Image: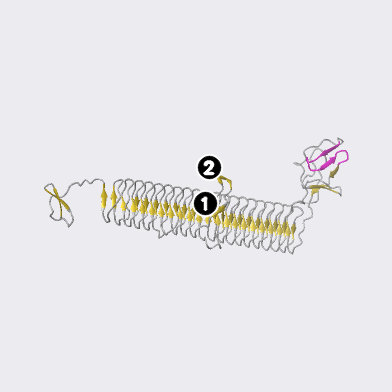
Amino acid sequence: MPTFIKPGFWDKRPKAYEHWLNLDNLITSLIPPGGGVTSIIAGTGITVDQATGNVTVSSASTSPLRYNTNATGIEPVLGTNNANGYSSFIGGGTFNTASGNCSSVVGGGNSYAPNRALSSFSFVGGGSNNTASNYYSVVVGGSNNTASGNTSSIAGGSSNSTSGLLSFIGGGQSNIASGACSLVGGGYCNTASQTNSSVVGGSSNTAQGDCSSIVGGQQNITNARFSTIGGGNINVIQSPTNECCSLGTTIGGGIGHNTVGGSFSSITGLFTVAPTSCIDAGKLSTISGGFRNCAIGFYSTIGGGNRNNANGYASTIGGGRFNNISCGISSTIGGGWSNTISATNGVATISGGTQNTASGEYSFIGGGRLNVASGSKSGVVSGRGNAASANYSSILGGRLNNTSTFTCAMIVGSNITADRACTTFVNNLSIKEIPAASTGLPAGSVWNNGGVLNIV
């Protein structure tokens, strides 16, 4: 039997109770008999009058001990555990309740924060102020957790709540799993509110769409079905009318995607003023990363960069900043800065450069600056300030060239304006290795006839 009085001060008295507490390691400050009143455990409210050997426990005591009125010693306070459900069980602790049939509370709890297993087959393992209130609900430990959903479970943490059928929270604080089969792995203030939704971690993330998922980060939110946010800060997948309008949307990470307004600190990476609104995400759209990109068109993709906008159907922006595909279908901007595709019928391409505009269907700009391809199937390879405005016209490079209204005109040089269709315009032409005979040349070929150019 354990020793309930510290050796050297009083007699060792074996007790006939299995649960008597061994005080050998608890008594911290005693003086020999006759020395007055001393606290056994500092701050517990338990005192011993060493002249008489009487033990007093004050009404304000928070100690797990009490004095046995039969003068047999100090014993644990068992409180008022109440296992009143059929085949219910309480293993220990104080003031715990197991009122559901076949319910169990293993331990923990106290008069201020008892554990409760209130429904059939519910279970609380330990901790304090935990509640399992529905069939087969489980709280393993932690504090202030509530498993109110049928077959829901909380492994630990604090102030977590599982109200959805088969919902689960692994830990963390103030997390909510209210959707059927929803999951919150941990973190702080995360919510998974729809069927099969999940938030793995992070803080203040919200997964509101069926089968939606947020891996981590902070203040990310999605209400679209089958959508995913990998992480980052204040990324939004907003489905406008119902959760199917933006289904399948993915944001890999980054900051502030599909949002507008607010103020951002590039030093801290945080918004000093929260975004004022958000933009509806395109169905099955993807933003891999970057800062404040918006993928609005169905099947649109943005690889990264800063403040790029993909509004066209199946449009793609690889990266860069301030690039915009405003309409059309299957248009692409590879990168660069402030490039714009406004081709209504789409399939336009800008590889890079800055401040270029492709507005003609199937138009192309390779790079450069301030170039315009407005004609259908027109192209500007590079240069500055060039305009391929006629259908099927093209400009190789140079500067300030214009194909005007002449179809199939081609310009190689600078400061040239086309004045005839199906014509190539150059500033200067130098032909090397001109054939010296016409033999075998097709019609229209140029050959050197003794210093005179002839055409076959």
Is 268 left or right of 54, judged from the image as shown? left
Q: How many marks?
A: 2
Task: Report if residue 50 lies within the magenta region.
Answer: yes
**Kind of residue at badge 1:** His
Q: Judge left or right: residue 333 versus residue 211.
A: left
Residues at discs 2 and 1 in contact (Cβ within 8 Å)? no
Seen in the picture, residue 120 relative to 455 is either above or below; the reply is below
Look at mark 1 in the image and give the residue it sits on.
Answer: 257
Tell me where residue 276 appears, x and y as whole percent: 58, 51
Residue 319, position as x, y percentages in the image: 44, 49
Which amino acid, by three-letter code, is at mark 2? Ser
Q: Earlier in the sequence, mark 2 or mark 1?
A: 1
Query: Dot 2 corresponds to which residue?
Result: 266
Give the structural element (helix, strand or loop) at label 2. loop
Q: Which mark is residue 131?
A: none
- Specify start and end residues of the magenta stretch as a single range: 36-53
- Residue found farthest to the front: 419
Q: Position of residue 204 (x, y in %)?
A: 60, 51
Q: Quadrant of the C terminus?
A: bottom left
Residue 428 on image: x %, y %:
24, 45
* Quarter holding residue 168: bottom right
Tell whether position 227 is magenta: no
